[in-house]
Image (spheres, helix red, strand yellow):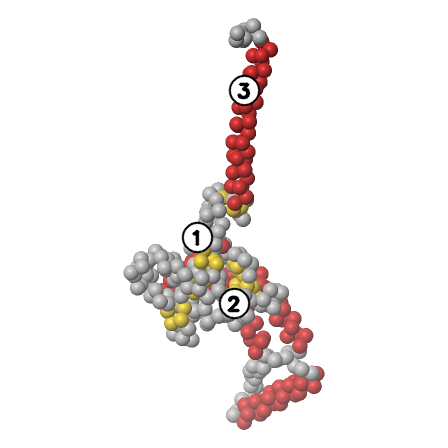
Amino acid sequence: MNDDITLNPEKTDRGTQELQRGELSLEQPVAEQTAQAMQMQTAQAVKCPHCGAANDAEAMFCASCGNPIGMATCPNCGADIDPDADFCETCRHYIRTDVCSFCGGRLNRQEAYCPDCGSPRGGIVCPVCRTLNDFSFCKQCGTPLTEEAHQLMEQLKTMPEYMEMQKLAKEIHQLDMNVPYASERELLLDQKNARLRERVLTLLAKDNGDFNPVIPDSTNQRMSKEEHSAKKRERLERLAKLLGQMEQAPQPQPAKVRNYAMACKPQGVPLAWECNFKHALHSSPCGCAKPQLGGKWVILGQTKKEIKDDI
């Protein structure tokens, strides 16, 4: 005779407990598998270096902030590059085929010339030093190569900071060309020659009937080492301050940053471009993979960093 469960509550409780334990034993492997899968997914996730968000391992850009998180490959040499870089710092080639390197305009693969600025896709040869360039200013001598580059130079000439930079750079170059006196004897000899020059010019003027001649100052700009060093140091400090004020802020188009920086560069002073991408020194922004992050010109010799690339 079968037991009536209504008459055996204890047996009913035991059955219920066994059933619950069976259900738990079935749920436990599922929960463990889910936890293991989540752990594997977390372990494979790529952490964004910009905001820290977790992304899929295959993701090239962060789903949270949009910044690149993976690496692409240079189509020219195969080196690893940032996905949004337009220049390979390994083989030193411009690698974008859909963006004009001179103005930042959009290109089709079939176009030999940019429809916006008219620049050739293969580059422009500098008329001064014969260097082939992918950008609007010659990376070797700084000559403007496009109409936009010439217009930018004219616009900058209206800025007091720009004109002051050019003036200081010229004065520094002139100081470098004038060798200071190596000794006190050289200084005394030069002073003696200056007096002799004034006497000879005075006698010549009197022979011509001019008894009150005005003798022009000598073009000799030599000075003592101490005076030479003090003048150069003062001008270098002023120039460095102005270069900091003209620092290029980040902006979307790399071509615009390169063009502005090259137009601002004062000639006659050894400079390097310090980029905000890797805080490395380049011979110019033309050698930086991501100039759109901004940067500034710095005077060589005033920083312990070494230049990263050659022209």
Q: Quick one: SS at disc 2? A: loop
The residue sitting at 52% across, 56% down in the picture is 277
In this figure, which residue is indicated by the disc labeled 2? Answer: 309
Mark 1–mark 2 distance (CA, rounded to whole Å): 24 Å
Furthest-front residue in this view = 1
Q: Amino acid at mark 2?
A: Asp
Residue 286 locus on image (x, y percent)? 46, 64
- The relative height of residue 108 versus residue 235 in the rendered view (above or below) is above
Q: Is residue 84 above or below residue 175?
A: above
Instruction: Give the residue displayed 58% in from the left and 9% down from the top.
Output: 9
Please tell me the numbered disc located at residue 252. 1
The residue positioned 48% from the left and 44% from the top of the image is 56
Residue at numbered disc 3: 19
Residue type at the position of mark 1 = Pro
Q: Earlier in the sequence, mark 1 or mark 2?
A: 1
* Residue 61 % position (x, y): 46, 48
Give the mark nearer the N terminus: 3 vs 2: 3
